[in-house]
Amino acid sequence: MSEEPVTLAVIDLSFHRATAAVVRRILEAHGHEVRTVEAPHEAAFGLLAEGRADVLVSAWLPASHGTYLAACGDAVQVLPTHYAPYCLWAVPPYVPAGPVREIGDLARPDVARRFTRIIDGINPGAGISRFSVRAVEEYGLGRQGYAFVPGTESTFTERVERGIAAGEWFVVPLWRPQYLNLRHGLRPLGDPRGVLGGVDAARPVVRREAAGRLHPAALAQLENLWLGNEGVEAIDLLAHSGHLTPVEAADRYRCGRSGPLGG
């Protein structure tokens, strides 16, 4: 086993940090020194493609990140699924389900009058951001004045907290796993046109040359790692509610489980 540090590329969103913390602990448990580098979606895959990162956590395949992964060519191997993410649009739980069940309901004039029509999101490279632009078009929401506006993770989460505190009717372009689902009980809207990408498989990606440097037991444990959406959200929520680092939250989550997270 090489003593060269393992560089872990992490997409710079909180739930990716939560997952990466578990991966980091697995690698460290088998003697690896781990360095992490955070970057937006496409840039993180670029680090992997250029050989400046050894492992990426995590690729959402095929819909959200398939195009980004293609740039890595045959230089990488994709490990098995460790959670099953999907994108969604949601509303706060106090918005009644009767008049607002599906995304298309937002285009009805009586509903649109109640809603804030700026739809705040995260960075434009995220799958949910690309899909949300399409949703505005596919469901005819622009005719009622809706517009998707990308932002940062911090401006997005602050906007959600502020809107809920005010009892505002607004749309949250979200995904699972993400801690806001647990914190606020957000209600997903139906997507009958299927514009939000469906369910992906979240899979760690390892450069082939780096895989040979990993301790075989570490690689085996990563291959058998299953967190599920619920596990990632639990770690994400622990970090935000307990003011913990992602690694501290992952350690606390693991200590609270009766068995290991991987094989």
Image (tube, rainbow, N blue to C red):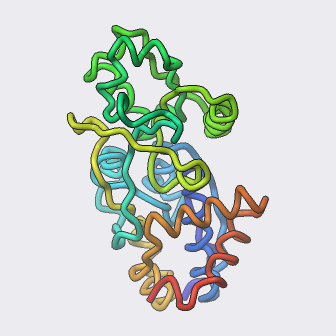
Q: How far across and down, in percent of the image, does residue 183 sit? A: 61, 52
Residue 197 image-quadrant placement: top left
Q: Is residue 10 visible?
A: no
Instruction: Work out whether 62 lies above or below 84.
Output: above
Instruction: Work out whether 129 lies above or below 248.
Output: above
Q: Is residue 126 left or right of residue 79?
A: right
Residue 6 image-quadrant placement: bottom right
Q: Is residue 135 left or right of residue 251?
A: left
Quadrant including the N terminus: bottom right
Residue 164 image-quadrant placement: top right
Instruction: Work out whether 117 lies above or below 63.
Output: above
Quadrant including the C terminus: bottom left
View extreme (right): residue: 243
Residue at 36% across, 48% down: 65
Q: Looking at this view, is 53 or 96 the one in front?
A: 96
Instruction: Work out whether 83 lies above or below 195.
Output: below
Q: How many marks?
A: 0
Q: How far across and down, in percent of the image, does residue 52 sit? A: 54, 57
Q: Looking at this view, is 114 or 132 the one in front?
A: 114
Q: How far across and down, in percent of the image, does residue 193 sit? A: 21, 34
Q: Is residue 136 visible?
A: yes
Q: Is residue 241 left or right of residue 78?
A: right
Q: Is residue 224 left or right of residue 251?
A: left
Residue at 70% across, 61% down: 239
Residue at 76% across, 62% down: 242
View extreme (left): residue: 193
Residue at 64% across, 39% down: 157
Q: Looking at this view, is 214 or 144 the one in front?
A: 144
